[in-house]
Image: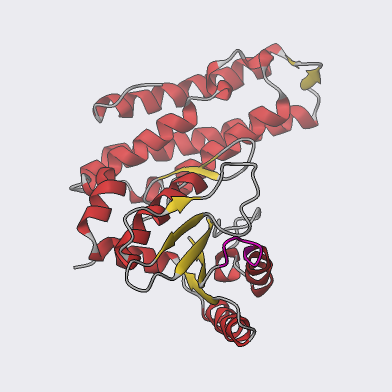
Amino acid sequence: MYQAFQPPLYWQQFEDLTEGVFPCIYGNAKPQKIGRPGQSQNGVDVHGKCLRTKRRVGIQCKRMDELDENNQPYPGGGITAKLLRAEYKKALGFTPGLDEWILATTAKRDEPTQRAARLLDEESQASGRFAVSIWFWDDYVSDLNRFGDLQREYYRDVLNVQNSFDLDKLTLELYAHAFSRPAFQDALHDENADDFLQAIKDSIRALNTGELLDRETRHVIRRAVGGRRTIHDDKWRRACDAIYLRLQELKIEFQKGLQNSSIKQQGYCLQIQPQVKQRLEALRSSSVADLNAVLILAGLHTV
């Protein structure tokens, strides 16, 4: 039997997991993370010695998004031969010198990237430098399945998911997070037009894909398994479908108002014609009310 695991959402968590994997692979119980954010790390995030061979091993962690800004998949999950070589050059400056350097990534296993790593490894060792290899997320999943303690330490919440009801609750919790934003809480006239529209689009995306983006960085900050179509409970799924349609209508009405000037940005506030405002408020408040009704049915906190 084989358990699937999603990559960590944050790069710090990926570094933590890599630090946990290190002793499982190399037998060294005390690898070290290098530096802190903002400090030069010379191409190494986690460093330690192999207990058996005493070889110095440095690992550079790259948490890569699998989709670009247009929601299209990156070939190789964003890892390229150019990026690999650039990170390799940084690691050449690490002291004391390494015997082995690894680029660890959350990207899926990719043959062209593997080939680039093999060629770089051959070139590096022929020049008397360190060995080069690459760890993909597939390798981490294998390690998590091999080492039970690793699973329990880093994925205990995932392991507690026992059935479809638990999965549905995780999805609804993500939706509650998406709706716990100023766009659904603050007075409509206090909103910025661009920010409000982006928040509605992000919430629609969350309902469809099960992924919630950070407003500033546009990185995924929370992920559930699938979107509204994967919810098992029929009543909850139909309710989420209705919320999705209402948000779509809210987005269209808001965009139309901007186009015909019934909605105008005045400094930090919005000027909205009364009829338009009433319609937008009705759509917004009913979306929140319907979501809260589902959250109550699931025994979750409302927004």
Can you give x and y, in whole percent of width and height, for residue 31 in the image?
Answer: 40, 54
Closest to the observer, 225 or 111? 111
Which residue is at a point 60% across and 64% down the rendered structure image?
78
Residue 206 vs 258, above or below: the answer is: below
Which residue is at a point 53% across and 19% down the rendered structure image?
282
Inspect this view and state whether residue 285 appears: yes
Closest to the observer, 129 or 204? 129
**Residue 192's quadrant in the figure?**
top right
Q: Is residue 94 magenta?
A: yes
- Image quadrant in which the C terminus is located: top left
Residue 250 vs 59, above or below: the answer is: above
* Prevailing secondary structure of the magenta residues: loop
Horizontally, is 250 left or right of 162 in the view? right
Can you give x and y, in whole percent of width and height, for residue 298 in the image?
Answer: 25, 31
Residue 262 vs 197, above or below: the answer is: above
Horizontally, is 74 left or right of 162 in the view? right
Residue 173 vs 143, above or below: the answer is: above
Closest to the observer, 109 or 231? 109
Closest to the observer, 66 or 121? 121
First to last magenta residue range: 91-97
Figure disc tally: 0
Can you give x and y, in whole percent of width and height, for residue 62 in the image?
Answer: 55, 58
Inspect this view and state whether residue 272 appears: no
- Image quadrant in which the N terminus is located: bottom left
Can you give x and y, in whole percent of width and height, for residue 67 in the image?
Answer: 57, 58
Which residue is at a point 51% across and 48% down the rendered structure image?
11
**Residue 213's quadrant in the figure?**
top right
